[in-house]
């Protein structure tokens, strides 16, 4: 059980880091902003899912 928790913590850190990196991207192109918004939404979903798994 401990091994899976370590992997979940590492995954959570990776997802959080990617979310922060995408959040810092500034662009004027509408397609790129839409893509970034989609990526951010997906990463936030994964963060929430990881938290729920860790709480269970």
Image: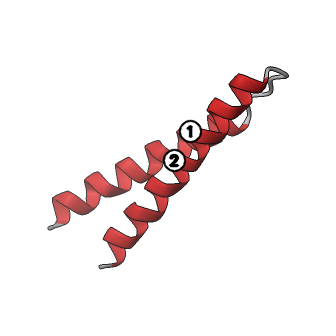
Q: CA distance from mark 2 to mark 1?
A: 6 Å
Quadrant into which the N terminus falls: bottom left
Placement of 39 over or under 12, stated as above or below? above
Outermost residue, left side: 1
Quadrant into which the C terminus falls: bottom left
Which residue position holds label 1? 39
**Do the residues bearing badges 2 and 1 touch, measured as CB atoms within 8 Å?**
yes
Which residue position holds label 2? 43
Which residue is drawn at the image coordinates 47% and 45% (left, top)? 15
Residue 42 position, x and y percent, is 51, 47
Which residue is drawn at the image coordinates 59% and 40% (left, top)? 38
Which residue is drawn at the image coordinates 27% and 52% (left, top)? 7
Residue 5 position, x and y percent, is 26, 62
Q: Quadrant of residue 46?
A: bottom left
Residue 5 - label: none
Q: In the figure, is residue 26 to the left or right of 48?
A: right
Q: In the figure, is residue 31 to the left or right of 39?
A: right
Which residue is drawn at the image coordinates 78% and 25% (left, top)? 30
Placement of 6 over or under 40, stated as above or below? below
Q: Quadrant of residue 51?
A: bottom left
Q: Which of 31/17 is in front? A: 31
């Amino acid at each position: 059980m401990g091994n899976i928790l370590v992997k979940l913590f590492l995954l959570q850190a990776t997802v959080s880091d990617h979310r922060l990196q995408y959040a810092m991207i500034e662009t004027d192109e509408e397609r790129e902003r839409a893509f970034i918004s989609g990526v951010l939404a997906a990463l936030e979903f994964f963060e929430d899912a990881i938290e729920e798994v860790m709480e269970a």
